[in-house]
């Protein structure tokens, strides 16, 4: 049985943590032995242990933390993994240092493959880590890969695209028993239609302020429309002030995460993602899986999986000239022709689920193990111990 190590040094919840859990559970079903090395009491540790995942704790205080290094060396020697998949700076660097040192000293008969997962573009890139420390760096989109390779010193074959798997309709989790009365009243009021929902938290790059201008123009043709916004994010207070300043209080509904997810499931006429730049973890794939017409910005990797007017709708980003008018035209068309837009949304959902399900995602990951793992039967030495 081949062993795979997963490492994560972040203590708080982060993009990709739920995917790590799905990867481990999926690989275990295919016969792999998976060990998660993370920080005690962290979000990932708690969630993994709820799923019965084999979890061991390291401090990961920094890339050279001696106690973490000693424990990592012990795990590497005892279980001789085929691959070590790392996710953050401290655990990535410490894992790479331990693996390379042990292999150079001849302690490991076979060097495990080192994979670094990048869900966000780093502030600075160091080509040596991409070229020498890790066998592969995985990115969630081709656009993100291109951003990393803007550093011409990084070897292109060292950076791969592995699209995240889509778990519909996984936009936000919620408790069905807690529906806010205000939300229920809004949903029951047939006059507050159409309903468009903005995917993602309120941030400087999410385009919410831009959407207020779009909504203001759309109200001419759709005087009772409602713009649904997630009540969460660093720029929430500023957006609320802007809604008041523009006199749009009657057209904007700020929803809790639970309320937002309920609307995604049944009542929404369109989803919008007018982002200024590509967010992490390809949220457009999850949005498409909801089977609701999706309109998004032509920026970064957002349109990668979308055929304009066939599986979704693509508009200029907020900073482009004429963007407000372009978004108004597209959304007006979507809302005035629900039959056609529903067909587009259905094709988008089918396309995403067929291409970006967990099965295909794991195939892509396993293909990397098979392609570059050093030859030989790993893990057959007598010192190997199975988890208790």
Image: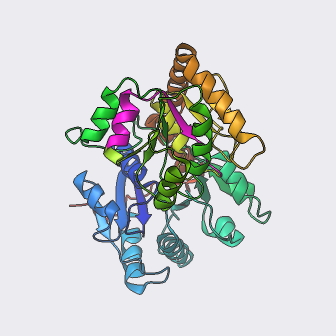
Residue closest to the eye, 68 or 315: 315
Q: Is residue 220 above or below residue 238?
A: above
Residue closest to the eye, 11 or 240: 240
Magenta residues? 259-276
Q: Position of residue 287 (x, y in %)?
A: 49, 36
Specify whether residue 181 is in view.
yes
User: Residue at 47% across / 52% down in the picture?
Assistant: 201
User: Residue at 19% across / 39% down in the picture?
Assistant: 177
Answer left or right for 159 relative to 183.
right
Q: Position of residue 210 (x, y in %)?
A: 62, 47
Answer left or right for 266 relative to 352.
left
Q: Quadrant of residue 242?
A: bottom right
Q: Which residue is outermost to the bottom?
A: 66
Answer left or right for 203 relative to 261.
right
Q: Is residue 244 above or below residue 315?
A: below
Q: Quadrant of the C terminus?
A: bottom left
Residue closest to the eye, 14 or 65: 14
Residue closest to the eye, 199 or 41: 199
Q: Quadrant of residue 3?
A: bottom left
Q: Quadrant of residue 174?
A: top left
Residue 262 is covered by the magenta coloring: yes
User: Residue at 29% across / 56% down in the picture?
Assistant: 48
Residue 140 is covered by the magenta coloring: no
Q: How is the image coloured?
A: rainbow
Q: Is residue 196 above or below residue 199?
A: above
Answer left or right for 30 relative to 208.
left
Q: Position of residue 274 (x, y in %)?
A: 61, 43
């Amino acid at each position: 049985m081949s062993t795979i190590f997963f490492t994560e040094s972040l203590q708080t919840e982060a993009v990709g943590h739920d995917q790590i859990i799905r990867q481990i559970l999926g690989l275990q079903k295919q016969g792999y032995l998976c060990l998660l090395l993370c920080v005690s009491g962290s979000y990932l540790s708690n969630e993994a242990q709820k799923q019965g995942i084999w979890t061991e704790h390291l401090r990961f205080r920094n890339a050279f933390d001696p106690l973490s290094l000693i424990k990592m060396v012990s795990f590497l020697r005892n279980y001789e993994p085929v691959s070590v998949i790392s996710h953050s700076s401290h655990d990535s660097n410490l894992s790479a240092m331990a693996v390379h040192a042990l292999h150079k000293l001849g302690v490991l008969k076979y060097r495990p493959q080192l994979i670094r997962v990048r869900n966000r573009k780093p502030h600075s890139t160091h080509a040596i880590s991409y070229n020498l420390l890790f066998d592969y760096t995985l990115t969630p989109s081709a656009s993100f890969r291109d951003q990393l390779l803007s550093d011409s010193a990084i070897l292109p074959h060292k950076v791969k695209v592995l699209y995240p798997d889509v778990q519909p309709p996984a936009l936000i989790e919620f408790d069905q028993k807690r529906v806010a009365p205000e939300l229920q009243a809004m949903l029951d009021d047939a006059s507050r239609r159409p309903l468009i929902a903005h995917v993602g938290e309120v941030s400087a790059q999410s385009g919410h302020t831009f959407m207020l201008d779009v909504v203001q123009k759309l109200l001419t043709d759709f005087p009772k429309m409602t713009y649904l916004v997630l009540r969460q994010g660093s720029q929430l207070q500023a957006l609320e002030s802007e809604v008041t300043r523009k006199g749009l209080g009657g057209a904007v509904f700020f929803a809790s995460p639970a309320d937002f997810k309920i609307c995604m499931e049944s009542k929404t006429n369109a989803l919008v993602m007018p982002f200024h730049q590509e967010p992490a973890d390809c949220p457009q794939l999850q949005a498409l899986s909801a089977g609701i017409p999706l309109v998004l910005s032509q920026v970064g990797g957002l349109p990668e999986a979308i055929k304009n007017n066939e599986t979704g709708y693509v508009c200029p980003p907020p900073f482009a000239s004429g963007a407000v008018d372009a978004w108004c035209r597209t959304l007006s068309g979507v809302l005035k022709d629900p039959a056609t837009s529903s067909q587009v949304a259905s094709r988008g959902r089918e396309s995403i689920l067929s291409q970006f399900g967990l099965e295909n995602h794991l195939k892509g990951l396993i293909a990397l193990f098979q392609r570059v793992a050093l030859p030989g039967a790993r893990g057959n030495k007598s010192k190997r111990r199975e988890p208790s």
